[in-house]
Amino acid sequence: GENVEQHPSTLSVQEGDSAVIKCTYSDSASNYFPWYKQELGKRPQLIIDIRSNVGEKKDQRIAVTLNKTAKHFSLHITETQPEDSAVYFCAASIPGAGSYQLTFGKGTKLSVIP
Amino acid sequence: DAGVIQSPRHEVTEMGQEVTLRCKPISGHDYLFWYRQTMMRGLELLIYFNNNVPIDDSGMPEDRFSAKMPNASFSTLKIQPSEPRDSAVYFCASSLKTGAWPQHFGDGTRLSIL
C-alpha cells in the first residue's frame, strides 16, 4: 500500500517568516495530494490540494508544489501569522476501481512565535 | 449547507460497555469514511462506504468494531465490548466522488474508556 512520510514533526518560526513542510510518498500511481490543518481539539480542515497533472498551486499565502519524479510534495506558508499555528497533515490518494483511500502523514506541529 | 455531523462529541464509559458513534454525511456525498486519531498512530482509516456499501474494512482493528450505513444520511460505528485502548478521537468524513476529491471531516467524537 501507499506510505506517506512527513517532515519535520515540529516546526517553529517567527511571525512573518515562511514555513515549509515536506512529504514523500511511495506509490507512483498516487494522483491526489491534499493538505489539512487541524487546530487543537478541532477537526482536520482542507486548506489546499493538488492533482498529479499540476506542478504547483497557490492560494493567497499558501502554496503546494509537487515533484512526481521524486515523489514528493511540499506545503509553503508565507508571511506566517500566529493563527497559522496548528498541526498540518499531508495525504496521498491512489486511484483504483472501487477503491479510494487517503493515506495521511503523521503530521507537523507548526508554532508561529509572535 | 451543513457539514458532516457527528454525535456524541464526547463519550466516557467503562470498559466492557457498548459504544455507538453516529455520523451524518454531507447531503449528496457518495463516500463516507471512519477514522481514528491517536497521538501514537496518527489518523488511521478504519472503514469506508460507497453508496451505503462497505468497500474496505481492512483498517478495523478487530471483531469488536463494526460499522453500518443503513441509508445515505446515516452511519454508525460500534465498539462492543469497549477497552481502554480504544480511547481516541473518532472522525467521520464524507466525499462527493471517488478519486481526486477532497474529504470533509466532522468535528469528531472524543472517546474515553475507563
Image: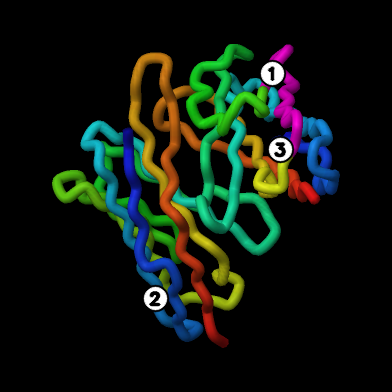
Q: Position of residue A23 (x, y in %)?
A: 32, 55
Q: Which mark is residue A18?
A: 2
Return the mark for residue B33: none
Q: Where is A84 relative to B27, above or below?
A: below
Work out how far the residue at label 3 is from the one at label 1, CA to CA, in angstroms. Answer: 20 Å
Q: Chain of mark 1?
A: B
Check disc 3 and report the residue beneath it: B3
Q: Left or right: A79 with respect to B4?
A: left
Q: Is residue A95 magenta?
A: no
Which chain is indicated by disc 2? A
Mark 1–mark 2 Cα distance, whole angstroms, equals 44 Å
Residue B77 sits inside the magenta stretch: yes
Rendered location of residue A22, percent (x, y): 32, 60
Element at badge 2?
loop
Residue A30 placement: quadrant: top left
Which secondary structure is most common in the magenta stretch? Answer: strand
Tag 1: residue type? Lys
Q: Would you call the spot at circle 3 few (<14 residues within 10 Å), some (14-19), or many (20 or more)?
A: some
For label 1, the residue is B68
Image point (55%, 25%), residue name? B48
Point out the stretch of residues depicted in magenta. Answer: B67-82
Element marked by disc 1:
strand
